[in-house]
Image (cartoon, rainbow, N blue to C red):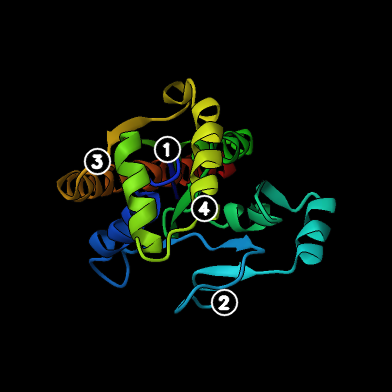
Amino acid sequence: MLVILCGPSGCGKSTLAKRIVEDFNITPFEHAEEVVMTTTRAPRAGEREGVDYYFKSVDEFRKIMDHQGFVYSEEYSGERFYGVTKETVREYLGNPDKIGILVTTPQGLRSVKNMLHSDEEKMSVFSCFLECSLGERVKRYIDRIGTDKFSFDDMSEISARVNRDFGMFLGIESDVNKTFVNETKENLLGNSKRICMAMKESRECLQNFLENKERDSQDLSY
């Protein structure tokens, strides 16, 4: 199963993804994990290869792109690329025993939806759009860098992200299963619980569907 979180920069996608993993991991047999993405940016303090990201050089990333290996990929300023591979996504589709949380862009959301062909694959994806005010998003970006380290380059980066996001997310509500306001800590905690409930309901439906499909297949074999 795959939960897709989509929203503009600074809306709290990554924070919510981590919270969902914490809230959903109740037993060793019922747990969720963040889908590991690939990037060309340098690792930040504490980030680990294969856990937070797969870190690649620009040449390595472009080689995967040339072989159509990504479901989607995005380029930001300074030749910083992000993407998720098709192989990674397929591990979760139609599989009730493997639950991934994918943080992505509208392009990534639509690309994943284009991969869904069977009923079980379509049933295994729950997509969300996170809304957050521009002022709060800018504040989070500055806080993440630190007011004492915030530079003109960072200001330019914020401006570029805001302008890009404005057009990128127009009409996105019609492409997702649910829209959540993610403005405050209370919003985040509530959203995590609601998404976890939706995941469990979808997982149960998928399990029942697969069991019925297997039963029908056995009946036809007699």
- Would residue 36 be visible to someone looking at this image? yes
N-term-proximal mark, 3 vs 4: 4
Badge 4, how many Cα within 10 Å: few under 14, some, many 20+? Answer: few
Q: Are marks 2 and 1 in contact (CB under 8 Å)?
A: no
Closer to the eye: label 4 or 2: 4
Picture layout, residue 85 above or below residue 8: below
**Local secondary structure at mark 2:** loop
Task: Say which amino acid is labelled 3.
Answer: Glu
Closer to the eye: label 3 or 2: 3
Location of mark 4 (residue): 152
Location of mark 1 (residue): 127
Question: Label for residue 49?
Answer: 2
Closer to the eye: label 3 or 4: 4
N-term-proximal mark, 4 vs 2: 2
Question: Quarter-wise, where is residue 88 in the image?
Answer: bottom right
**Local secondary structure at mark 1:** strand
Nearer to the camera, 112 or 78 = 78
Question: Label for residue 183?
Answer: 3
Nearer to the camera, 196 or 131 = 131
Place of residue 175 in the rendered image (x, y in percent of width and height, measured from the top left): 48, 26
Question: Quarter-wise, where is residue 173 in the image?
Answer: top left
Task: Say which amino acid is labelled 4.
Answer: Phe
